[in-house]
Amino acid sequence: MSDESHGGSRNSGAVDPVGQGGVDQFHNPGLPHHAERITDKDPRAVKRAETQVMVLFIISVIGTVLFFVGYFGVGHSGIEIGTKLRLQNTLIGLGTAFAMLGIGLGIIHWAKALMPDHESVELRHEIAPESQRAEAQEIIETILEESGMDRRKVLRNTLIGAVLVAPIPAVFMFRDLDRSQLGANAMVDRLRHTMWAKGVRLVRDPSGLPIKASDVQLGSAFHVIPEGLNELKEGKLNEKAKAVVLLMRLPEDKMTVSPGRETWNVDGIVAYSKICTHVGCPVALYEQQTHHLLCPCHQSTFDLTQECKVIFGPAGHALPQLPIEVDSEGYLVAQSDFQEPVGPSYWERG
Amino acid sequence: MTQTSEYTPKTSTGRIANFVNERTGAAGMVKEFGRKVFPDHWSFMFGEVALYSFVILLLSGTFLTFFFDPSMAETHYDGSYIPLRGVEMSVAYESSLAISFDVRGGLFMRQVHHWSALLFVAGMSVHMLRIFFTGAFRRPRELNWVVGGVLLILGMAAGFTGYSLPDDLLSGNGLRIIDGVIKAIPVVGTYISFFLFGGEFPGTAIIGRLYMLHILLVPALILLMIVLHLMMVVIHKHTQYPGPGRTENNVVGFPVGPVYAAKAGGFFFVVFGVVAFISALFTINPIWNYGPYDPSPVSAGTQPDWYIGWVDGALRLMPGVLGDFSFERNVALPWGENTFVFNVLLPALGPAMLILGLMFTWPWIERWITKDNREHHLLDRPRNAPFRTAVGVAGVVFYCTTWAAASSDLIATHFHVSLNDVTYWLRTIFIVGPFIAFWITRRICLSLQRKDRETVLHGREAGIIIMSPEGGFTEKHEPLNEYKRWRLVSFDTPVYVPAQPDEDGKITKQEKRRAKWSKFFLEDRVAPVTPAELEAAHHHHEVEGGDEPKALGH
Amino acid sequence: MKALSQRRRSPLAVFALLVIGLMVTGGLYAVAAGSVSEAKAAEGSQATVGNAENGQKLFAANCATCHGLSAEGSNSGPSLVGVGAASVDFQVGTGRMPMQMQGPQAQAKPAQFDEQQTSDLASYVASLGAGPAIPSEEELDTKSVSDEDLAEGGAIFRVNCAMCHNAAAAGGALTRGKFAPTLSGVTEKHIYEAMVTGPQNMPVFNDSNITPEEKTQVIAYLKQLETQGSPGGNALGSLGPVAEGLFIWTAGLGLMVAFTIWITSRHA
C-alpha cells in the first residue's frame, strides 16, 4: 500500500526474518521482583481482610434469609402481579443474588488477600514427543497389517459399501414425521388450497361476524377469516395460517386493475392475503393515506393501489388477491379460492 | 496400588484423601492438577462466564421442566393473569403462564434461565473474539478453536429451540419465519418444513419436538463439546500474554490449588449472583404481553433473541425486487417449472456461511499465508498482528451491520429517522463497511506499533514541561525500565514471504496466489526495536542534547 | 485535586471521563425528557359544551391557513367537512394540531388550546357535516368491563392494533419516518377517538368493524396493561428481544468485565 507505512521499518533496516532468534535481540529480563502486599507486611491488614471476608459470608446468609422473606412473606398464587408479585420476584432475586455474591466475593477476596500470591512458573511439555508419535504410527500400521485391510481389497470395499448403505433406512424412518399419511404430491399440494371457496362469507377475526359491503368505509381495514374457521375442531390454526385476509376499501380512481381482475373487487373493496410472500409474517400494517401495507417483521412494503406489488423490502412477489363479491343478503363472500398459493415461496410453487 | 504400610496419613483430611486414593487412584490426578499453573488475566475469564452460565442454565432449566408441559392441545386459560382469562391457547403457553404467575419463584427462575441464556452466548462470543484477536487459535490449538465454534453454533441452537417453547405470539411468529426460510430451500425445503412441523405450519407437533431437542439432544452435545474443550485446554496448557519472565516454554501464573481454584470457584457464585441480580430487577420476555400464538396477529418489533438477530437482519437487508427484477426466479426445468427463492436463500445462508466458514478455517488460512507453522503459547497484542486484527474488525463490522439491521424499526422510531433510510444506509455499510473497517484498523494498528517504537527509542512522556533558556517548551521523556521495554519489544510479527519454489524448483499457481495474499496482508509491517537501534537512538540524543520531543528520526 | 491531576494519564482516565460525560449527557436528557412528559400528564379530559361561533373565530385564526377559510381543504391540509367532532378533539386535544411543521406525520405535543377552545373548535367542525362525535362517558367507562370482556378486548387489540402499536402498546415504526405512537399515557377518550376517526395513516375502525362495546373492552385492556405494572421488574421499554440483547451486552457483560478485572488484579 502506501509508502509512508514502511517508514519506520524500512529506513531503519529493522525488518528481521520470521522467527526472531537473531543475535540482535533484547534479552528477556525475567520475572519482575515480587512486590509484597499490604497483608504480607501488616498484621492489622490481615485482621481487616479476615473481617471483610467474614462479613461477605454473613451477607450471603442474610441473602438466603431475604429469599425466604420473599418466598413466604409475600404470599403465593393469585397475588396482584404488578405490586406483590413484583415485590416477591425482587426479594427472591436479590436474596439469591446476595447469597451467591457473598460467597463468591468472599472466597475471591480470601484468595487475593490471604492466600500466597507468588506467581509460579511451570514448564510446558511437548504435546506429542517425536518418539511417541513414531511409536503410535507403528502400532497403527501393525493393526492395519494384521487386520488385512490392505491385502483383502474385496472384503474391505464390500464392507465400506455395506456400511454406507446401512444407515439409509434410518433416514427414511423419518418419513412419517409428517403425520398426514399423504403421498408426496398430495403433501405439497396442500399449500395451494385454503378454506376459501365460492360463496364463503368474509367474517371478522376473532369475532366471526359477517361483513356487509356498506360497513367497509374508505380508510378502514378489516381483519378477516373465512366463515366456519372458528368452528373447526381439527387443524384450525393450520387453516388460519393460510386463510387470513385483510379487507380494505380504496377510492376507485386510485386503483390499477390488471386484466382479468376487473370483477375481483366490490366498488373498490379489495381483499388480499395477509401472509407475507417473504417468509410468512402477517402483513397487517395498513397505512390508510399512502395505501401501503407493511410487514412488521422484515419491512416488506406492498402498494395496495398497484395490486399489492412489492415496492420495498425483501419480499419477492405481490400479495395474492382474493376475488370477492356480494351475496344476496348484502354480505361479502369469496368468488373462489386464491388463484395462487399464499405465503412464502417454495420450490414447487412454479 | 498404594503401599499403605509405607505411608500413613497424619491428619483426618489426609486419611479421607488416602481412603479415596487407594480406591480410585486419584493421587495421580491430584499430582497432575493440584498445583497446575494457570495464567491470570481478566480477558481469560469469558470462557468461564459461558461455562458457568451453562451450569446455571442446567439448574434453572431442570426446575422449569418440572412445570412445563410441551403440549399444543387447545385449552382455555383459567389462571391468575386476568387479561388472558378465558382466552383459547395451547397447553404449552398455559403452563408457561402458570410458571410465571402460579408457581412461587417460577417467574424468577424463568428470568434466570432466559437471562443466563443470553449471557451464555454473549460470553462465548466475547471469549472467541478474545481468542481470535490475540491469536490463541494458532498451533497447537486449532482443533480447540473448531470445537469452540461448534459450541457457539450449539449455543445458538439451544437458544432458538428454547425461545420457541412458550408458544407465545412472538416466538410463534419466529417459527413462522423459520418455516418460510426452510421452504425456500431448493428441492427439499417444502418436505423439510412438513417433516419438522408434522404437516402444515403450525401443526401440533413442533413444540414437543423442539422441547426434546432443547432439553436432551442439544444440551448433551454441548456437554460433550465442553468436555472435549476442557480436556484440550489441559493438554495444551493455557496461553499467556507476553511479558517479562514469560516465554514460549513456560507458564507463569497461580497454582490451581488454592488460589486459582478459589478464584475460579468463587467466580461461579459471582456469575450466578449477577444473573440473579439482573433477574430480580429486569423483566425478560414478558410472554403474558404477547398472548398465545395465532397466525393472524403480530406485534410491532417482532425480533429474535440477540444471537439470531444477525440472520434476521440479513433477511431484512436483502431487496426482494430491484426495479422490475425479482430475486424470486421461476426456472423451467425438464420436469416442470420450479422456484428459486434467492431473496430468502442468499441472506439466510450467505452471511452465515461467510462468517462461520471464515471462522472455522481462519487458523489454516493464516498458517497458509504466513507459512508460520510453529507452536505459539505467547499471545499477540492485537496491534502487533495488524492484518489479523483488521480482518477481525472487518468481520465484527459485517456482523454488527446485519445485527443492527434486525432492529431497523427500533432505530427508526428511537432516532426519529425513516425506516427506509435506515435500511438503505445499512445496505451500504453492509457492502463497504467491512473494507473501510479493514483499512482503518490496519492503519491504526500500524500507528500504535510505531508509537510503541517511539516510546522504546525515546522514552515515555513524563508529563514534565521544561522551558529552555531560549523560551521554548519541551516535554521531558523518561527512558523505560527493562521490564516495560520488554513488553514493547518482545513481539514477533510475520513478514511477507514471496512465492517459494517447491521441491521440483517450480513455483505453483497456488503458491503465487499465497504470495499475493501474503504481500497484501503483511507487506506493511513495523518491526520491533533492536538493541542496536536503541543504542543509535541514545547516541542521537546525546548529540542533540537529549530530551528532544517527538524525534521521528529513526 | 492534586491526586486527580496525577492520575489523568492513567489508562482508566479516558474511560472515567467517558463515563462521566455520558452520565452528564444522559442525566440532562432525562431531565429534559421528564419535563416534557410532565407537560403531557397535565392534559386532562372533561366534557365541556362547545360554542360553534367561537370555534369559527378560532378556526379562522389558527387553522384556516392550511385547511381553508371554510375548512374546504387546500394543498397543505385536508378538508375537514364531515370529519366530526371526535377528530378535532383528538387532533387538537393531543396537540397534534395545529401542526408545528409539515413532516411525515403530525406529532403529539402539549395542547395549544384549552378544553373550552378545543370543544368550540369541535362544535364548529361538527356543524360543517356529520361525522363521529366525541364519545360519551358511558363508552369510556372501562370500570364496568368484566374480566372476560377485558380479555376479549386483549384479543381484539392483538388482531387489530398490535402489529403497529406493539403487543405491549409501546409503539412501532411505519414506512418513511412515520410511526405508530405508544399508547401508554393516552387518555381513554383519545384512544376511542383515534379508533373511530383514523388519524393520519391509522385505519378507521368504525362501529361495524369494532363495536362500541368492543372499543371499550380494548381500552379497558390497555388501561389494565398500563396500571398492572411489570411483575418481573423493569420492563426495559417493553421493546422485546432487542432491548434485552442490548442490556445483556452493556450492563450484563459490563458487570462481568468489572468483576473479572477485580478478580485478576493484585491485592494492594
Image: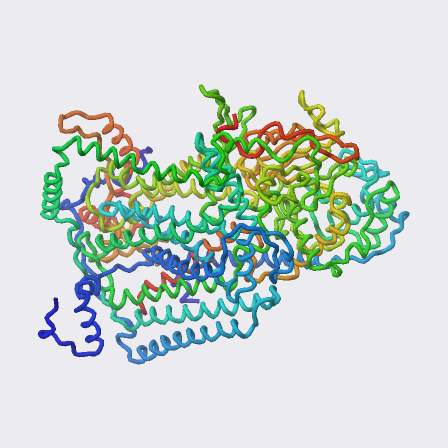
Q: Position of residue A184 (x, y in %)?
A: 47, 31
Q: Is residue B530 left or right of residue A315?
A: left
Quadrant where the C terminus of chain B is found in the figure: top left
Left/right of residue A280 with respect to residue A6 in the rendered view:
right
Can residue B125 be seen here? no
Q: Quadrant of residue B450?
A: top left
Residue B58 position, x and y percent, is: 40, 59
Pick whichever, C227 or C267, lies toward us: C227
Q: Residue at x 29, y 44 (%)?
A: B385
Give the percent coordinates (x, y) of residue C209. Answer: 74, 43
- Give residue C87's position: percent from left, percent from top: 78, 45
Q: In the picture, residue C43 is in which quadrant?
A: bottom right
Along the line of sight, the residue nearer the viewer: C266 or B280: B280
Q: A27 above or below C77?
A: below
Q: Is residue A119 visible?
A: yes
The residue at the point 53 percent across, 48 percent down is B171
Task: In this rendered view, identify the residue nearer to me: B179 or C221.
Answer: B179
Q: Is residue C194 left or right of residue C264?
A: right
